[in-house]
Structure formats: structure tokens, C-alpha cells
Image: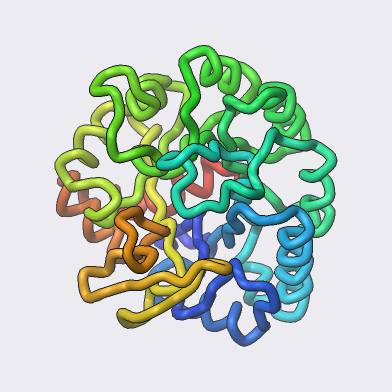
Amino acid sequence: MSSTGLFDMQVNGFAGVDFQREGLTLSGLQRAAEGLAAAGCPRFFPTLITDAIESLERKFANFEMLRTQDEALARAIPGYHLEGPWLCPEEGYRGAHDAAFMGPPSLKDFQRLQKAAGGRIRLVTLAPEWPGSAGFIRELRRQGTHVSLGHTSAGWAEIHDAVEAGARFCTHLGNGVPATLHRHDNVIQRLLSVDELTAFFIPDGIHIPPGTLKNFFRAKPPGKALFTTDCMAAAGAPPGRYTIGASELEVGDDRVVRKPGANNFAGSALTPQEGVANLSRWLELSESEARQLFGSAVAAALGV
């Protein structure tokens, strides 16, 4: 990756293309990758979210088949991020993910998905409060896959056990939680306080207000706060109706991604270069510092 290129570890879709839909075409994936490159992000992790294992298996196999048909795509996609299905099914914590497919982590299911993905699942987001999570995390780390905590209601002991087992990241910290939490003892504060965990934040001003993002950034040790778009198909595209898998979403002029009639967010419409500009402005970082935290530092943390 060039020294100036950005790296996004959580891309659900881009330029009108939804990565969660079965039957993703070569031209669609090329359009998304070209759009991301034009937005300053030449490499990224396509992210697949909670679904039936059989469906995820087909989607990963399709991604791998498309990568082999285009050398530029193979360079752009060094790995995948699996967000779910081992997340917290409770209202608020699950976000836009379908609770019907959630449950405790399964090594057998992970191996099915990893085989379909050609061994390129580089990051898994899970909720460590499920029974058996510590052993699951330990085995994924042994195999070289990173683990991130997200969409979780985990207590102190469960977070401690996950970190001891090898979890090293937090996925979109500050989001994937209910709107109302205990003012002090809540999972955001717990995860922020664990210095071993590198936190990813979404700098769109929607998922986290700029002032709160500044506080979160200051709460983490230097180099332990990194950034992602968590973008979906509306990123790099005009307002309108889009999908994340089976869910239809609405994106207005305010660039907020919502299920029609609902208040919770479902990914972002942020582009990487917009994220860098926001970081520079809100966190008073130089452009080179902001680009590093959205680029080379991300790639290095994930071993890309």
C-alpha cells in the first residue's frame, strides 16, 4: 500500500453496490473498488454481516471467485471482515443485524466460512459474553485471524477473558449499543478503559457527535484509536433507497442511513476521504496524521 493510501477495515458496500446481496457480480465489485480508490482508499476489507452460515458461505465463495478474475481486485481486497453472527441479540446491541441467526461461536462454522473465503477472513467481530467465546478467540488467534469486540453487552470479566484470549480490537466503539445506558457502568466505558484494545470509530458526525469523538480519542492511548467508515451502498452514491442484504434502507440529504420509520443507524454513507477531512477538523490533526490513522496504522494493526 502506498504511504498515502487509506485502508478501510469495514466496508459493507459502496457506490450503490451492496456486498450483502447474494449474486454480487464482477462489474459490481469492480465499481465499488474503483469508487473506493477514487475516494483515496485503494485497499479495504469487504465486510459480511450476520446471516445464515450457508448464505455467508456462498457469499465468501463468490467474493473469492471474483477476486481470481481481476488482479486489481485481488490487490484491493487482501482479506475479509466477518461481523457476526456471534453478536448480542438484545435490542439496541444487535443494531441492524438479524437476531434470528445469532448464537454462540462455532469453530466448525468458522472453518466452513474460512474455507469458502480462501483463508482470507482476517478479522472477526463478536460479542464475548457468549459461552465458549474465550476458547474460540484463542483458536482464531492461533490460526492468524484477528478478533474485535462489538455489538456486545459484555461485563468486565467477559471483556478481561476475551483480551486474555487474544482479542485486540473494538468494532465501531460507541455504536451498536442501546440509546439508554447506565451513565457510568456501561460497555462503552468498559471498552474505552481497556488499554490493550485498539478502538475503531466512525468519524461521520452522525454515529458519534464530534465532541464525543474527541473525548473518546483522548481516552485511548496513542495509536489505540483508529478509524473506519462502516459504509454501505449509499457511500459514494446519491440519496435514495439502498439495501443491506434483505433490509431496505433510506438515505436522505442528511446522509443518515436508516430503516424507513426507524431511528437506529444501519451503516454509514461516509467515504474514506470525507472521514479524513472530519478527523483533521474535529480532532485538530494534520492531514498526514489523520491519513495515517485511517490508513497505514490500520493496515499495520491488522497485519496487512
Q: Residue at x 57, y 39 (%)?
A: 87
Q: Where is residue 5 in the image (x, y as percent from the top left)?
A: 44, 62
Q: Which residue is drawn at 63% across and 38% down?
A: 146
Q: Where is residue 257 in the image (x, y as percent from the top left)?
A: 34, 65
Q: Which quadrant of the view contains residue 21?
A: bottom right
Residue at the far top: name it. Answer: 157
Q: Position of residue 273 (x, y in %)?
A: 32, 65
Q: Which residue is drawn at 36% across and 72% down?
A: 250
Q: How is the image coloured?
A: rainbow
Q: Which quadrant of the view contains residue 145?
A: top right
How many numbered marks have been drawn onto this rendered protein structure? 0
Residue 36 visible somewhere in the drawing: no
Residue 106 visible somewhere in the drawing: yes
Q: Position of residue 278 (x, y in %)?
A: 22, 56
Question: Quick check: 182 left or right of 117?
Answer: left
Q: Which residue is drawn at 19% across and 44% down?
A: 283
Question: Quick check: 297 left or right of 240?
Answer: right
Q: Which of 30 and 3 is in front in this view?
A: 30
